[in-house]
Each structure stands twice: as C-alpha cells, then as structure tokens.
Amino acid sequence: MSPPLPSCVEVPVLLSKLNQTVKDAKDLACLNGFLMRTKENPDSSDVVSPAPFMLLPSSIPKHLFQTALSIQPSINELYFKVANDYDFLWKTLEGTINVDEFTAKQWEIMKQVQTSGKKKSLQVGMLRSDYMLDTAKSYDLSLSQVEVNTIAASFAGLASKIAPTHRLIIRQLSPETDVSKVPLNNACSGLSEALYLAWKAYGNPQAVVVVFVDEDERNIFDQRCQEVAITDFDPTIKVWRRSMEYVGANANLTEDDRITLDNEEVAVFYYRTGYVPTQFKSDLDAEGDAAAEKAIANPDKFVMKPQLEGGGNNIYKEEIRTTLQKTAGTADRSKYILMDRIIPHSVKNYVIRPGYSHTETADYVSEFGFYGSFVSLDDKVLLNKAAGHQVRTKQKNQDEGGVAVGVSSLNSPFLV
Amino acid sequence: MSPPLPSCVEVPVLLSKLNQTVKDAKDLACLNGFLMRTKENPDSSDVVSPAPFMLLPSSIPKHLFQTALSIQPSINELYFKVANDYDFLWKTLEGTINVDEFTAKQWEIMKQVQTSGKKKSLQVGMLRSDYMLDTAKSYDLSLSQVEVNTIAASFAGLASKIAPTHRLIIRQLSPETDVSKVPLNNACSGLSEALYLAWKAYGNPQAVVVVFVDEDERNIFDQRCQEVAITDFDPTIKVWRRSMEYVGANANLTEDDRITLDNEEVAVFYYRTGYVPTQFKSDLDAEGDAAAEKAIANPDKFVMKPQLEGGGNNIYKEEIRTTLQKTAGTADRSKYILMDRIIPHSVKNYVIRPGYSHTETADYVSEFGFYGSFVSLDDKVLLNKAAGHQVRTKQKNQDEGGVAVGVSSLNSPFLV
C-alpha cells in the first residue's frame, strides 16, 4: 500500500462551506463555457447545462505528470510510424481483420491506398495517451498506460477551461493552498495547432477545414472550442461542421486527387465522429494464448477490451474467465485485447452534476490523459509535441469510465 | 433625413446562410459564457440559456464612439462633484423629496451622514452613460444622452464577451468585412478595477468586497464576470455575494465606524440590487412649467421618466399630455423628469433568443453605453477613466428598453 498523496483541500469539506461552493462552482463552470447540451435537446443550444466535473482536483506526483508530458512526442512518433508500416499492421491485425467487420473495412481502405501507389503526403496525428496512478506494481505509485486514443480524442476543449474554476474553488475552501499546483492547460490550442499547420502546409488559403460531426451532439462545446482555436491561429481559416452523410453525398474527388465540397477545396478532415480504435495486438498466437491462460487463472488482474470505443463494452472479473474459455481456439478471441488490470489510487472527492447537490463524499479514481500533436508532410515532421492534459474521475466502484456515458467527470491535476 | 450608415454585412442575409449562422451564434455565445439563468429556474445554474443578443453589430460613426469614450472621465468627475455637493442636491431634489418616499429616504441617509460630521473618505463611482444616435437634431447623426446609470450599472460583464462572437459571425457572413471595426471591450475589467483599487486603498488585505445581490438572479453571469475580474487584479481578494437582508441582519458597525460581517471586515460594498436613480432636476419651478407647456403642445418630442429604474415605466406621446395636464400645479409633477425625445437612427437586424429561430429581419434602434470608473480617497482621485462600452438594441416600434424585461438585446458597435 503506497502512502496517501497530499490533497488540495481537507476532505470532507465543512458542510457550511460545501453547499455554497457547489453553487459557486456551477456558476463558474457556466461562465467559462464549460457546458454540454441537455439529454432532452441534444441538437440545440437554447438550453444548456454545466458539463459534469469534480469539485476538487486529483493529486498526482509532479514527476509522474512531467514524465508523461515529456514522453508524449515519442508516443506521437511511434504511432505515426506504426500507422505507416503496412507490413507490421497486417501482421498485427490479420487475425482481427478475419473476424471483425469494422477493422476489415478500415484495412480495405488502407490496402486500396497502398496498392494505388498514391502518396499520403500530409498526415495529422491528434492523440491522447491515458494513464492511471497504479498501486498494483510497487510500493511507490506509478503511471500505467490505459490506452492511446488516436482520432476523435475528445475533451481537449473543455479540459482547457477547468483549471481557472478549480483555482477559484480551492481559494474559497483553503486560502493557504498554492493554486499554482493546478497547472493551466493548453490542450485545446495545442491540438488545434496540428489542424492549423496541416491547413497551412496544404498550401491553398481558400481551402476549408471540415470537422466530421453528428447532428445530435451533446458535447458540442468541446468541439466548438477547437474550431474557434483553429481560427485563433489564422482568422481567415474557414472551419465547417459537416456530417459524414453530407460529405459522402456532396464531396467530389478531382482528377488530381483533391477533394471539393460546396465549391470549396478541403485542406483537412478532422474526425469527431466515425472513429476507429487502432489495435496493435492479436491474441490468436502463442503469446496471446499464454496471456489468456494467465487471465483465466487470475481474472481480477486483467481487463478485456473489444474493438469498440466510447465506454461500456469492457469485460471484467469472472466474465473474463468464461469469455476466454468459451472462445478458446476460435477466431472470436481476436475481437478482444487482454490488458493487465490497474488497481488505481483512490481519494475522497465530490462530483458536480446539474440537478444534484452532492454534499456526500465518496472514493474516486482518476485517469490522466496527455494530448499529443503531430503533423508530417512527406517525410518531414512539421509538428511533434505534447499538447496539454486531461483528467477524468469516476467512482472507485465503477469499472467503466466515459464522460459521454455519464460515468466519468472532468477534473484537473493537483501536482504534489 | 441623415444618409444611411454602412452596415457590417448586407441585410437581409441569405436564408441559406442565416439559419446555420443563428445556430452557430448560439453555440458561440454559450462557449463565451454569454448566458442567463432561465425564467423557470432563476435561482439555479443547472440549466442556463444564451442571453439575448443581436446577430449583427450596430453601426456607429467612429468619431462619435471615440468622443463618447473621451468625455467619460469628465462625466465621472461631474457626478462625483454633484454627489458631494449637499446644497446643490438639496436645491435640485427638494421638490422630489417632498412627494417621493424613496428619494426622501435616500436623502434622510445623506443628511444623517452630513450632520454626523463623519467623513466619506473612500468613494467609488461605477457609471454608465447611455446615448442614442439621434436623427432629430440635424442632418448629421449625433449622440444624444439618454441617462447616466450611477450604481448597479449592469451588463459590463456580458458586454465584454460579445465582441469575439460578433467577429466570428461577420467572418462567416462576409469574409471581406474588416472585423477590427468591432472593437474589443474591456468594460468588465475596467469597472472591476474601481472595486479593486478601493479595496486596496482601504488598506486591510483581509477585508472583503461584498456584492449586494438578489437570490433569484437571472443575470448572475454578468455579475460573476465582475467578481472574477476583481480577483484577476489580486487573487487573494475575497468577494462575497450577499443579500441586503442578510447584511442587514448580520453586519455590525464597530466603534471606529468599520463594518464587519461574518467575522471579516468589509472594505467595499458593491450594489447590484437596491439601486436608486440620482435625479438632477425638479419640474416644480418656472423652468419646469415652461417645459411642461412645450410637452403638452408637442408630446411626441418628449419622454417622461419617473424615479424608478429597470424599464417599463416611462410615459410617451398622448399620455404625456394627459399626465401633465392632470398634475398641473400639483406636487405629483415632481415625480417625473421631462426629457427631449430622441428620434433614433434605425437599421435592419435579427435578434437571437433561446427558443426562436428568427429568420425575419426588422427595424432596430440602438443605445450606446460607455462605462466610467472613479475612485477617490479623501480629496485625492485614485482612478478616473472610461471603462469600455455596451450596446443594447431593440425593435424600433418598442418605446421601452431593458434586457432584463426582455425587450432589448445586447450588441456590439461597428465603427464606420
């Protein structure tokens, strides 16, 4: 058991202060545009609500936070190289492609591009690498990687807005706390820089940036942050929101492989919908079988993740054993990735959600995400950097996370 | 008839662009925290809506805008001197005090302070001088002053947030328009500086700034902007929101005339409720009678304003004649100020309000407000400056304005 981390304020908070602070926090969240559309009206901004967030930032050892930031450019580069290594991807994904229609479809596109001989000259990576503070490996806390989100990595916009709110909350509850331990966050600007540089490298000042979106999008303000951030780099850039269906029906490919839409040339497509997780490991080999045996013996130490993203699909505990036994020797096993289970560090906190007053504390665990921006033109790297951070916090007894599915809440790090 | 002013974009806007732009504008308003609480839940920020605003900025000749800004320090000084001239105020307000209970009560307080011999050492002025583009006086447009708001001058917070939204709207509708003609606005910071400097001049770093507020406050985000802006000057300043009733019940006066509340000393009180209009003119004299005769003969050229603020109480047209005739020779006439009626310049525009799509244009008139900040310690002026601007726009056929009463909408100036 690792020693507890110092907290930004003493928990539980005195009830006399807590009620007012929760009200203040909601006001400040609104004031910062930290919002979501409502479940009832996901297609309209006539009535909106504060996005869910935690009252108190989550403590993280400063050196771990800085390490994660510092290795982000290497992760960016790794994913860029993997995404362009046709042979490695085939070797890794072959088993999955045989059983999973979605991955097979993506591979089909990749193969078409590969065999056409056409060059993917301009490439953009906007990643987020997620970690938890793991107590399972050693006495000291360490960061264990949960996953890397490759496209549609979300919440860079809202995550950039929460630090000022948390600083004000801490000042109210504990004037003696050093609020500079809640770092400011450039995630929104940092990620958007990749789109700006890609637009610029494309070389046509009239060309537009098209963001693929859904019509009913509760998380629209997160996306809007990035759209505005792109125009902060150059106010003449046109940024359009379009559905996949609309682009499918209205886009044209010119003879020299440029895409036009509504009479304008498209410089960059940014996917905020229709995303696919990139996979690196099939379990249908000897190494996979060995991992499966370990998981059948100790299911509590593992998590089984299917291809799908968005939360709510992972398999835990006893169900891992039965699923692995049922799929032994079959191709169905390739639909899953088997991962070491992280036993995350937990702390007391309060959640803030519209419609609830939440004056009771509970045990919460946090996932720390670090964004990465990457742009390459032919073989030249134009941008490769860490681009801010994100923290999502959920109750300890919740296996699955996900702000969109209503389980996780956004949060800030508190560097200790 | 003065020549029309150039508009920021061509009106009417093409319907194919307008529908999407209205949706975009609502998103951007939310993203900037340009919000109000709902009528249904004025005491909660769980569900909020964009505050009403105009789709397009209102054109104003640049030299008139700059003139109004440049004379604001003189207006600040004038109001400071008037507020401290006991004899002048008595001479001017005597008639009103005799018939109006509210003004009489304020005068009673002023008299108590005056006769106690206690010094008003630290004084803060946060004003807003409102003008309309008048077409009545000459061929050229001119600014005619409508009124000066002395305390609780509102919307400095929200007004500071709207310029970026308007710049983005203009870029979408008319890429060739120079958006720098929509000036950025420092009203929130500029007004809050007065509270910060007063707090600093008070000399006790532990002392708090208390904002008088109502519990049910739809316009809370406007107020919150200023509360946050105060702490931007010095993050250690405690800013409390309290009702008049709470302060009345819990504040104490020390023997050396300091006020304490909840065990803290209060440096400054900022009134966002319980405000009183300062009046300068009684009509119960020969000059007033002469003005009344003119208004009876030409009621369309005048407006009658009672003591009350907040919109919805002014008297116009034929009712001016009947009211003046009814109150001739009575003390009741002193309840009103008779003002020249402004015939304001009007333009086509669109209003944006939650729940409406507003794709039809109408004729709108604008009121241009300029904020002023003033702080004095004993006879020394610590701050005297213009502090940003505000534009409110309403339909031409609406006699009365007021964002709070749902008639006016916030707007930006477009300098031409």
Image (cartoon, coloured by chain):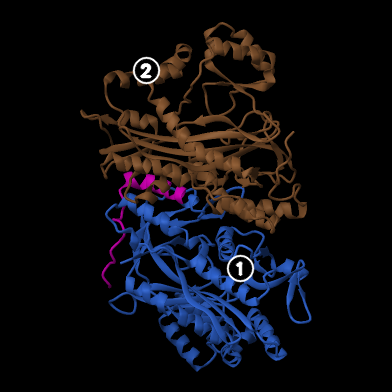
Chain colours: A blue, B brown
Residue B33 visible somewhere in the drawing: yes
Which labelled disc corresponds to residue A272?
1
In this view, A292 is above or below B409: below
Question: Residue lying furthest top in this view?
Answer: B329
Q: Is residue A405 left or right of residue A357?
A: right
Tell me the amino acid under the disc marked 2. Glu
Q: Are marks 2 and 1 in contact (CB under 8 Å)?
A: no
Residue lying at 52% horizontally and 87% vertically, measured from the top left = A283
x and y percent of residue A330 in the render? 58, 87
Circle nearer the viewer, 2 or 1: 2
Q: Is residue B298 left or right of residue A21?
A: right
x and y percent of residue B104 in the render? 42, 16
| Residue topped by disc 2 | B108
- Mark 1 chain: A
Residue lying at 58% horizontally and 70% vertically, measured from the top left = A196
- Mark 2 chain: B
B158 or B3, which lies in front?
Answer: B3
x and y percent of residue A66 in the render? 37, 74
In this view, A110 is above or below B405: below
Tell me the amino acid under the disc marked 1. Arg
Q: Secondary structure at mark 2?
A: helix
B19 or B409, which lies in front?
Answer: B409
In this view, B341 is above or below B354: above
Q: Which portion, as a residue range, is magenta?
A: A1-28
